[in-house]
Amino acid sequence: MPADRQPPTVADKILAGPTALDAISGELDSLRNRLDRRVDADPENVERGLAQLVLTLVELLRQLMERQAVRRVEGGSLSDEEIERLGLTFMRLEERMAQLKESFGLEDEELNLDLGPLGKLL
Amino acid sequence: MITVYGMAEPLRRPPTAAGIGGAPVEIVQHRSLVLAVTTHVSPPDRSTEAVLAHAGVCEDLMSTADAVLPVRFGAVFDDEAALRSSIDERYEQLVGGLEHVRGRLEIGVRVGWNRAATTSAPSETSEAPGDAVGHDLSTGDATGDAAGGRAYLMARVEEERRRNAVQRRAEDLAGRLHEALRAPAVDSRLLVLPTDGLVMSGAYLVECPGLDRMVAQVRETAREHPELDVLCTGPWPPYSFADVEDIRAS
């Protein structure tokens, strides 16, 4: 390769591809998110940071339990009454989570942890 | 503080690309390895520009050495002694890693659901093989408010089925595509459904002279699957094949 080459541009790096790159360009945002997401150590924001951490764990548990309930519904092991009761419980839990997120000013994406090669927590 | 970009063996000329924040790239020779580093007063920022500068130095190394092992972005050491001792701890692995990538380059292939071709999201093509479940899972058209809980849970059941159907479809597709794509490659890495929009993302390590064959293989795969968007990028430094145990700051 020539010694004095210019740094490659985006076009130089595309060897074959479609004209519309919508799905793929979304990855750029995910890179930016990863770079921007750091723990905010500002003392005035400690409460929000703690709420973020606690709600992340609560949301993880909520989703795990909900999936478990879904599996039981699919397995056919629940009576109509149990389905109704479980559904109501999860519906209220979700509403309560939405309220908590709103009062701490947290977005869904903030209640997630990037586990690197393992993907996202939620 | 020292930031490390990559290691090579040997370099035909000194690196010319600038490092993070425009810092000049220096060379640290340790045993048989040549490391490209920059010196900073404090740990450099994690920004898009910094990532691009890191990639620029790795690209530069690639153009001047036959064997380059990029180091993960963000590797920072207190001083040169800390860097050298970290390398000593895994010297054999690093040399082995360099041999594995010698004379080879990485080609990336990303496959996306083609929205124009499918018109709707793939999740909505209801070929879900779950229809046979004996239980009636359609909306409990029961009475008024009492149906709230049931309707909520049934909506979740549907969502879960759609998710599973997408997962199965992606795994099946990715498996077949990867099988064809890896034929011209020496080594490969596959991620299925790395993001919602992508069926798979594959990395293929190819011999330099085999580059055209790899690209031809990608084009053929893309032709066979007009329902998918296939993007082939590269050549890259072998980022996905530098998975020697992380070089970490002490």
Image (cartoon, coloured by chain):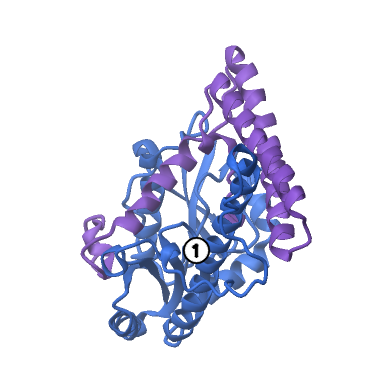
Q: In which quarter of the image is residue B168?
A: bottom right
Badge 1 element? loop
* Residue at image mark 1: B193
Q: Quadrant of residue B160?
A: bottom right
- Colour that chain A carries in the picture: purple
Residue B2 x/y as whole percent: 53, 40
Question: Looking at the image, is B151 positioned above or below residue A5?
Answer: above
Q: Residues within 10 Å of mark 1 (few under 14, many from 20)?
A: some
Q: Is residue B204 visible?
A: yes
Question: Looking at the image, is B154 positioned above or below residue B237?
Answer: above
Tell which of A32 and B102 is nearer to you: A32
Q: In the orientation shown, which residue stands out farthest toward the top?
A: A44
**Residue found 54% across the figure and 70% down from its top:** B98
Name the chain letter of the residue that bears numbered label 1: B
Q: In the orientation shown, which residue stands out farthest toward the front?
A: B143
Question: Looking at the image, is A54 positioned above or below residue A120?
Answer: above
Q: Give the quadrant of the C terminus of chain B.
A: top right
